[in-house]
């Protein structure tokens, strides 16, 4: 398992530098992954600056987990993401390294309440001064 990544702040858009720091990869790697994974399409504004949304940051973390932690090739990771898109796993709000509860069925997708609880805990941490 890879290093623990910082929680994703409650923001609408993230610059490529912020995403690189949140996901533990370099900006040039993110630009390369945009070419390899059709799911990554950040909004581009003035001067061709990239702005990523929350769901794209989660996708990048999934890609990073597949490539760096699980040892997939680019092609294998692309296929796995397509499989997940077809059968609905993992849950959109789930972090890539989140483990299922101990009472979960072996092949059941992660439960939404766990992702919601994690998101609420992250928000509470942001709001506490």
Image (spheres, helix red, strand yellow):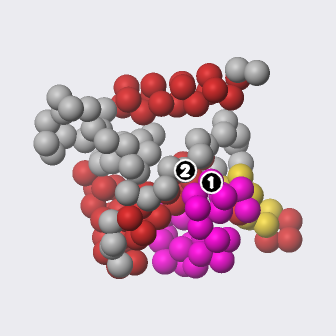
| Labels 1 & 2 near each other (Cβ < 8 A) | yes
Give the side of residue 67 with respect to residue 103, left or right.
right
Magenta range is 17-41
Q: Residue furthest right?
A: 46
Looking at the image, which residue is at 70% across and 42% down?
12
Q: Main secondary structure of the magenta part?
A: helix
Label 2: element kind: loop
The magenta stretch spans residue 98: no
* Mark 1 nearby-residue class (10 Å; few <14, some 14–19, many ≥20): some
Give the side of residue 29 with respect to residue 78, left or right.
right
Image spot of residue 82 (x, y percent): 33, 64
* Mark 2 nearby-residue class (10 Å; few <14, some 14–19, many ≥20): few
In the depicted structure, whether residue 109 falls above or below residue 85: above
The number of numbered badges drawn on the structure is 2
| Residue beneath disc 2 | 5
Looking at the image, which residue is at 13% across and 42% down?
106
| Residue beneath disc 1 | 22
Looking at the image, which residue is at 33% across and 72% down?
71
């Amino acid at each position: 398992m890879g290093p623990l990544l910082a929680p994703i702040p409650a923001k609408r858009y993230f610059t490529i530098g912020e995403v690189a720091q949140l996901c533990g990869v370099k900006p040039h790697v993110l630009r390369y992954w945009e070419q390899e994974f059709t799911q990554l399409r950040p909004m581009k504004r003035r001067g061709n600056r990239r702005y990523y949304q929350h769901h794209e940051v989660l996708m990048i973390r999934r890609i990073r987990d597949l490539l760096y932690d699980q040892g997939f090739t680019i092609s294998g990771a692309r296929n796995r993401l397509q499989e997940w898109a077809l059968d609905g796993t993992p849950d959109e709000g789930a972090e890539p390294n989140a483990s299922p509860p101990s009472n979960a069925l072996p092949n059941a997708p992660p439960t939404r309440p766990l992702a919601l609880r994690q998101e609420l805990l992250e928000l509470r941490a942001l709001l506490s001064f």
